[in-house]
Amino acid sequence: MRSIKRTGCALGMVLITAAATTVMAQQLPNDDVIAREAIKQAARSASTIEKADRQSRQLRQAVPDVGAVGPLPAPLPAPDPSDIAKRYGAAQQPQAALFVLVSLSMPPASLDRLAAQAGKAGATLVLRGVVDGSLTKTAEMTAAVIRQHPGAQFQIDPTLFRRFNVDQVPTFVLATPTARGQTCGKDCDAQGTFVRVSGDVTLDYALEHLARQANPRFARLAEQRLKQVRGTP
């Protein structure tokens, strides 16, 4: 009986071992499966390595190489407050205007000559009032002059005749602005707010005279306008 039992036991162990081997054989992948899996792993590894390399390059680009850039430019000097104040003050100073006080009763040749030069110099032709009490007639006459000299411009302003104390035409005036409505007459001349010259002369001749004024500011402004009339730099 013992021999049969031992034989049976041995046979059982052989059967168990064979079954386990069969199960293990069934669980282990074959060579094709292993090869395919190896290919997949290699592809995933290559993708991971490429991604890491790309991120590394981006990081290197984001961080500048200070040594390769070279020396930094010197900082700009701080602005000078006094220089800023001077420039601001110059911008706020009123600019002088150039007026040619005229009448439409002047000889046409004289008026045409002044209109042509006034356009070049940026001067304004000023009338005391309307002709024969008619605004329409005045507009027609000034329009005829402007058609011949498109750069000319007229305005009707009797207050300028009072401010500059003008009693004959043409009168040429370089003037700084005054308070609105101020008509100081001869007092303006005493305050140094304008310079003027009268006579049946050309605008460039009048500006030459004004450029010789004792007031250096008005002399400089007259020279600038004279250059505009003559087209010189």
Image (cartoon, helix red, strand yellow):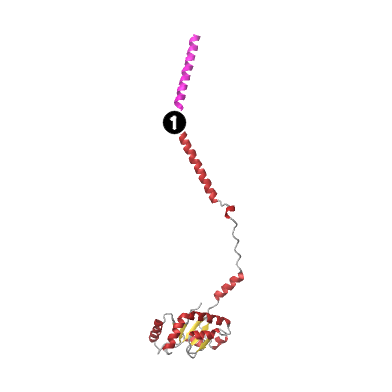
Does residue 122 appear left or right of residue 85 in this picture?
A: left
Which residue is located at x 47 percent, y 17 percent? 14
- Identity, as a three-letter code, of the amino acid under mark 1: Val
Determine the secondary structure under disc 1.
helix
Picture coordinates of residue 119, whole percent (x, y):
45, 81
Q: Which residue is mark 1?
A: 33
Viewer-proximal residue among 21 and 183? 21
Q: Is residue 17 magenta?
A: yes
Which residue is located at x 50 percent, y 42 percent? 50
Q: Quadrant of residue 26?
A: top left
Residue 222 in the image: above or below residue 65:
below
Residue 4 visible (yes or no): yes
Picture coordinates of residue 59, whole percent (x, y):
54, 48
Q: Is residue 98 magenta?
A: no
For the record, the magenta segment spans 1-29
Picture coordinates of residue 33, whole percent (x, y):
44, 31
Q: How many marks?
A: 1
